[in-house]
């Protein structure tokens, strides 16, 4: 299937540099691999159940979205135990230490990913209900 995407030039340039450095045959193959990694990551997050402890990290343009992000964080204060914030030029990096039901943490991650001014959201599940 052929498709097109709107991606900032600097992201495409960095993506091209990375796949070429890795010796991948072409951009299409690299995009397929990246999409598969995304699907696998999403599937792991969807499959997690029970009580979890997780670290959620994300970067964003402060002035574009800070009020809305604070609203989301207040909405999920039942699972957010602690936050850390640092400024990196026009971007900010935020980390949320979370504990609670996996579905609630997952909904928080999806809410954060829904903002255009949020560039990346990464999740690390430290412990889930299946571990003893």
Image (cartoon, grey):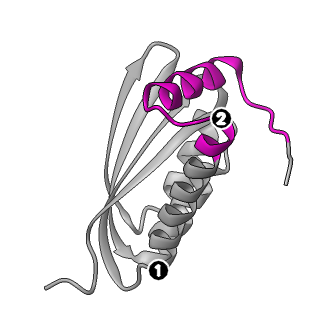
What residue range appears in magenta?
Answer: 4-31
Name the element at disc 1.
helix
Q: Residue at x 86, y 46 (%)?
A: 3
Q: Residue at x 52, y 32 (%)?
A: 19
Quarter of the figure with the N terminus:
bottom right
Quarter of the figure with the C terminus:
bottom left
Q: Residue at x 50, y 68 (%)?
A: 106
The residue beneath circle 2 is: 27
Residue 66 in the figure: left or right of residue 41: right
Is there any visible trace of residue 52 in the rendered image? yes
Image location of residue 86, percent across then percent down: 35, 26
Name the element at disc 2.
helix
Is there any visible trace of residue 62 in the rendered image? no
The residue beneath circle 1 is: 47
Q: Earlier in the sequence, mark 2 or mark 1?
A: 2
Asked if residue 34 is among those painted magenta in the image, a careful observer would answer no
Q: Residue at x 65, y 25 (%)?
A: 12
Q: Name the magenta segment's main secondary structure.
A: helix
32 to 13, vertically: above or below: below
């Amino acid at each position: 299937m052929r498709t097109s995407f709107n991606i900032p030039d600097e992201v495409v340039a960095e993506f091209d540099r990375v796949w070429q450095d890795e010796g991948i045959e072409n951009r299409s193959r690299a995009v397929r691999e990246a999409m598969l990694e995304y699907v696998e990551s999403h599937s792991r997050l969807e499959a997690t159940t029970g009580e979890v402890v997780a670290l959620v990290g994300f970067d964003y343009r402060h002035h574009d979205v800070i009020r809305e992000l604070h609203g989301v964080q207040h909405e999920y204060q039942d699972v957010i135990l602690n936050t850390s914030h640092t400024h990196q030029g026009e971007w900010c990096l935020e980390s949320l230490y979370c504990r609670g039901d996996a579905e609630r943490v997952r909904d928080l991650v999806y809410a954060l990913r829904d903002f255009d001014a949020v560039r990346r959201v990464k999740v690390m599940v430290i412990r889930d209900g299946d571990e003893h």
